Image (cartoon, rainbow, N blue to C red):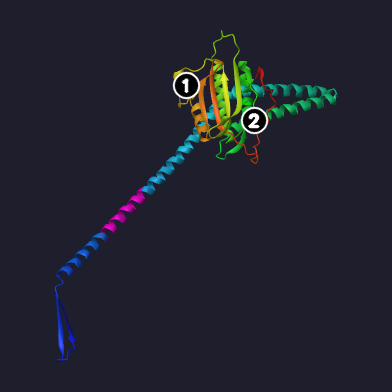
C-alpha cells in the first residue's frame, strides 16, 4: 500500500486528508517492465556477441576468398606464361634456321673482308662491313621479337592496332610457314583496326590461332594436290554494342568434326600426338579474349578446313596513343604468295 497524508485548511478547523492507494498492480507492472528490460539487454548483448562472431567469420571468409582469387590469378598468369613458353619451344627450330642464315653470311663476309684487306681493297672491305651491320640488325630484330613474346604480360590495357599485332605474329611464324610451303592470302583490311588490349596477350592469341592453323596443315596427307593455305580476313562490322573488329583465320586443312567444335576450347583437349602440345592454347586464348570483352569461335571454313573467328570491340578514340611495336615490312593486299 502507498499512504499519503496532507493538511487540509477548513473553516471548521484544521483537517487532514489521508489517501491510501493499492500499488500492487503498478509494482508488478514495474517489475515486469524491469524484467523485460533486463531480458532485452541480455538479448542485445547476445545478439551483439553473435554479430561480432559472424563479422569475424565473414572477415576471415573475405580474406580467404581474396587470397584464393589472388592465387587463382597468379596461377592463371603462370599457366599463360607456360603455354607461351611451350609455343616458343615449337618456334625454336624455325628461329634457329632464321639465325643460322645471317650467321653464315656474316662469316662469309668477314672472311672476304679479311682477304680484301690483305689486298688493300678497302672499298670492298667497307661494302662487306655494311652487309655485316645489316645482318646483325636483322638478328637483333629476331631476338627482340622473342624477348617481347616471352616476357610476362601486364594488366594495363592499351590502344592496339590489330593489323600491326597480326604482322608481328606472322613474323614469328614465318619460318614454319616457309617450311610447310604455306600460301598466305590476306584480304583487304582497314588501315587502322584498333582495339583496347594488353599487347603481349593479344599477340599470344594471334600466335596460337595461326600456330593451330599451321599444325592442321602439317597433318595434311601427302597425296593431297592442292597446296596448304591460310586466309586472313580482317574487317570492322557494326554490332549491337557498337562497332567490332573481326579477324577470321581460315585454313584448308582436315578441319574439325562437330564433336571437336564443341570441345575445342576445353582445357587440355588436343588432337595432337602425346607430347606435342598441352591442349591449353585455345582455352587460354578464349579466356584472354573474354577478358577483353570479345569472343572467340570455331566454325567449318569454306576452304575445307577450320575457321577461327576473333571478335573484339572496336576502339575509335584518336586521342589514345598507339603503343610502339616491332615494325613489319609492307605486305600487298589480296596477295597470294608463300609466306
Instruction: Tell me which residue sits at (68%, 21%) in the image.
Output: 101
Q: Is residue 278 magenta?
A: no
| Disc 2: which residue | 164
Which residue is more in the foreground, 127 or 138?
A: 138
User: Quick one: which residue is furthest to the top in this view?
Assistant: 223
Residue at label 1?
261
- Choose between 286 and 78: the one closer to the eye: 286
Helix, strand or loop at mark 1: helix
Q: Which residues are magenta?
A: 41-57
Residue in the image at 76% along x and 23% along y? 109
If you read the primary sequence from the N terminus, does the residue marked by circle 1 or circle 2 appear first?
2
Check contact, mark 1 vs mark 2: CB within 8 A: no
Left or right of 263? Residue 99 is right
Check the picture and name the quadrant holding the C terminus.
top right
Residue 300 position in % (x across, y down): 51, 18
Find residue 188 and report its horizontal and vertical position in percent: 65, 24
Q: 323 or 104: which is nearer to us?
A: 323
Task: Classify 184 as above or below 288.
Answer: above
Left or right of 322 in this view: 12: left
From this view, report whether residue 127 is shown above or below residue 194. Answer: above
Name the spot of residue 227 as percent of width and height, x first.
61, 12
Amino acid at each position: 500500500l502507498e499512504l499519503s497524508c496532507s493538511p487540509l485548511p477548513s473553516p471548521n478547523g484544521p483537517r487532514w486528508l489521508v489517501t491510501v492507494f493499492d500499488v500492487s498492480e503498478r509494482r508488478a507492472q514495474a517489475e515486469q517492465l524491469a524484467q523485460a528490460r533486463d531480458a532485452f539487454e541480455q538479448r542485445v548483448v547476445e545478439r551483439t556477441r553473435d554479430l561480432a562472431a559472424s563479422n569475424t567469420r565473414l572477415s576471415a571468409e573475405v580474406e580467404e576468398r581474396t587470397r584464393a582469387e589472388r592465387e587463382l590469378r597468379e596461377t592463371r598468369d603462370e599457366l599463360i606464361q607456360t603455354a607461351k613458353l611451350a609455343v616458343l619451344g615449337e618456334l625454336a627450330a624455325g628461329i634457329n634456321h632464321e639465325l643460322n642464315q645471317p650467321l653464315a653470311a656474316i662469316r662469309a663476309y668477314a672472311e672476304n673482308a679479311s682477304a680484301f684487306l690483305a689486298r688493300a681493297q678497302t672499298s670492298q672491305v667497307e661494302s662487306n662491313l655494311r652487309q655485316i651491320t645489316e645482318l646483325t640488325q636483322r638478328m637483333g630484330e629476331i631476338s627482340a621479337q622473342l624477348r617481347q613474346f616471352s616476357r610476362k604480360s601486364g594488366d594495363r590495357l592499351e590502344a592496339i592496332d590489330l593489323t600491326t599485332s597480326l604482322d608481328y605474329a606472322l613474323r614469328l611464324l614465318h619460318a614454319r610457314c616457309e617450311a610447310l610451303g604455306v600460301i598466305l592470302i590476306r584480304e583487304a583490311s582497314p588501315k587502322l583496326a584498333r582495339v583496347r588490349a594488353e599487347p603481349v596477350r593479344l599477340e599470344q592469341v594471334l600466335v596460337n590461332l595461326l600456330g593451330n592453323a599451321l599444325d592442321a596443315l602439317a597433318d595434311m596427307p601427302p597425296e593431297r594436290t592442292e597446296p596448304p593455305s591460310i586466309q586472313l580476313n580482317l574487317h570492322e562490322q557494326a554490332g549491337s554494342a557498337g562497332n567490332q573488329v573481326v579477324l577470321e583465320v581460315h585454313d584448308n586443312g582436315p578441319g574439325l568434326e562437330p564433336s571437336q567444335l564443341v570441345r575445342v576450347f576445353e582445357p587440355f583437349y588436343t588432337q595432337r600426338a602425346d607430347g606435342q602440345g598441352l591442349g591449353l592454347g585455345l582455352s587460354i586464348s578464349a579466356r584472354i579474349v573474354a577478358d577483353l570483352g570479345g569472343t572467340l569461335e570455331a566454325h567449318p571454313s569454306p576452304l575445307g578446313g577450320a575457321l577461327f573467328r576473333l571478335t573484339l570491340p572496336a576502339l575509335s578514340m584518336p586521342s589514345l596513343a598507339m603503343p610502339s611495336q616491332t615494325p613489319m615490312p609492307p605486305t600487298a593486299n589480296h596477295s597470294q604468295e608463300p609466306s
